[in-house]
Image (cartoon, rainbow, N blue to C red):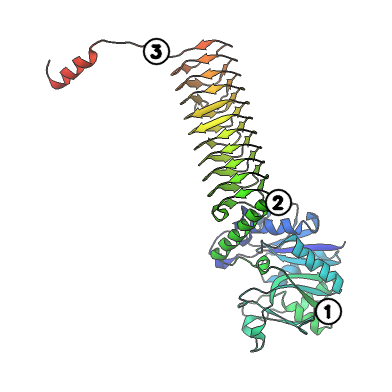
Amino acid sequence: MGLAIVIMAAGKGTRLKSRRPKVLHAIGGKPLLEHVIAAASRIVAPADIYAVVGHEAASVEAAVAGTGVGFVLQAEQLGTGHAIQCAQEAIRGYDNVLVLSGDVPLIRPETIGLLWEFHQAQDAAMTILTARPENPFGYGRVVRRGSDSAEVEAIVEQKSLSAGQEEIGEINSGIYAFKTAALLQYLSRIEAGNSAGEYYLTDLAGILVAAGERVVAVEAADPEEVLGANTIAELVSLDATLRAQNAERLMAQGVTIFRPETSVIDADVEVGPDTVIEPFVQLLGKTRIGSDCLIRSSTVIENSTIEDGVIVRQSCVIAESTIGSGARIGPFAHIRPGSEIGEDAHVGNFVETKKARLGKGAKANHLTYLGDAEVGAGSNIGAGVITCNYDGVNKHTTKIGAGVFVGSDSTLVAPITLGDGCYVGAGSCITKDVPEDALAVGRSKQVIKEGWAVAKRKRLRGEC
């Protein structure tokens, strides 16, 4: 086998001050580790990717189980060198190994590919991915044999830098490529001669050089790609960078995003050309938005599909639902999971749907709740209509045919069916099925008592 990728994902992330495993903290709507796996999966098949897990291993494995990668347990976390020791059996059959960090989510497939191609071209035992950030303080510096040389002489940690080495701006990213044979041959020579008592993979560079093996370095084009998240502030900064990249990607594809710095757009969101996104919009999860849509300010759309030509007005919430082409939603509409809003349908202000299907051209324009409901094409649901779908134990379905008119402030007690073309009088409480083209009125008879109000006022004033 040619190439395996090992992803370090066992650490606690102590500096995050969190009980959650470090690699499960999220940016761009998904865990750090999932971003790295996605990039690695563009280079090799998931079956050739191994995540080294340790702290809360079961939680980490469960979070990325759907990616298809393998897992290696580092039961006791004794450093990066020890992590690779734990993975020896998994990688032994491969010719080469890439080592990535599970907390470096901005790494691009192109940069991983650059490392892999350079490693092969140089026929090196070890290749180090480097970067030149604006401020290299705190990072290990890469000392090359010459200014124009690919070969590395040493990696020197910040505290061990000499006066001249402090000027070096090239840092070790902690991302490497190895010939597997050389890696396994010299891995046991790493010693835990540090205050933490850990085995650092970084030390392998010096061990290989001393053994006469070839160690080289290649620089990443963008230093931000190799930045990790060691604090919550750094995590939030990476999230902002990723979301800005997402906005730029969408705008390059023909999407207009006004005030993109105010938008929250997750990594897996897709938007078609000529769609306009106004400020303070959140597009989350695996949301898909078609072309020629307008998504107005302060709307939140999560894991939903919005087809072409849809207008979503201000301050709507749409979750796990589908909106058909040409539909009009909001303002202030709440489309809850399982809803299917049909082509050219209207769901207006303060309307809530839950597991409801509206047919083509159906309308519910004001102050309505449609739960567990099926509404036929062209039907009109008046203001204040409620489907009573829950009896305290079970949910029941309301079926409304095509071309039905339901008057304002009506209550439809499920299970119930309204036939095609029927009318329901305003203010009705409907508890029985209504035939096609019938009129249903379910309200008490109006009573008028002439002069009653005058007599009432007199009694209140004590005049009689």
Q: Left or right of 445: which side holds 105?
A: right
- Labels 3, 2: front one: 3
**Secondary-structure class at tag 2:** helix
Dot 3 or dot 2, earlier in sequence: 2
Give the vertical position of 93 relative to 213 (above or below).
Answer: above
Which dot marks residue 65? Answer: 2
Mark 1 and mark 3 lie on one chain; the one further toward the N terminus is 1
* Local SS, label 3: loop
10 Å neighbourhood of mark 3: few (<14), some, or many (≥20)?
few
Q: Are marks 3 and 2 in contact (CB under 8 Å)?
A: no
Q: Name the residue beneath numbered marker 1.
A: 214
Q: Report which quarter residue 200 is drawn in.
A: bottom right
What type is the residue that disc 3 sits on?
A: Ser
| Structural crowding at the residue carrying mark 2, measured as other residues with C-alpha within 10 Å and reported as few (<14), some (14–19) or many (≥20) | few
**Do tag 1 and tag 3 residues touch (Cβ < 8 Å)?**
no
Q: Quadrant of the C terminus?
A: top left
Q: Nearer the viewer, mark 1 or mark 2?
A: 1
Can residue 126 be spotted in the picture?
yes
Instruction: Name the amino acid, label 1.
Output: Arg
Q: Residue 262 at x, y = what percent?
A: 54, 53
Q: Picture coordinates of residue 161 (x, y %)?
A: 65, 85
Which residue is pictured at 52% across the width and 45% down the height?
297
Across the whole image, how many numbered discs are drawn on residues? 3
Q: What is the C-alpha distance between the residues marked 3 and 2?
A: 59 Å
Say what secondary structure mark 1 lies in.
loop
Where does the N terminus fall, quadrant-wise?
Answer: bottom right
Q: Position of residue 32 (x, y in %)?
A: 64, 59
| Residue receiving disc 3 | 444
Res 21 visible: no
- Label 1 Cα neighbours within 10 Å, binned few <14 / some 14-19 / many ≥20: some
Disc 1 to disc 2, how far (Cα)?
Answer: 37 Å
The residue located at (65%, 63%) in the rendering is 103
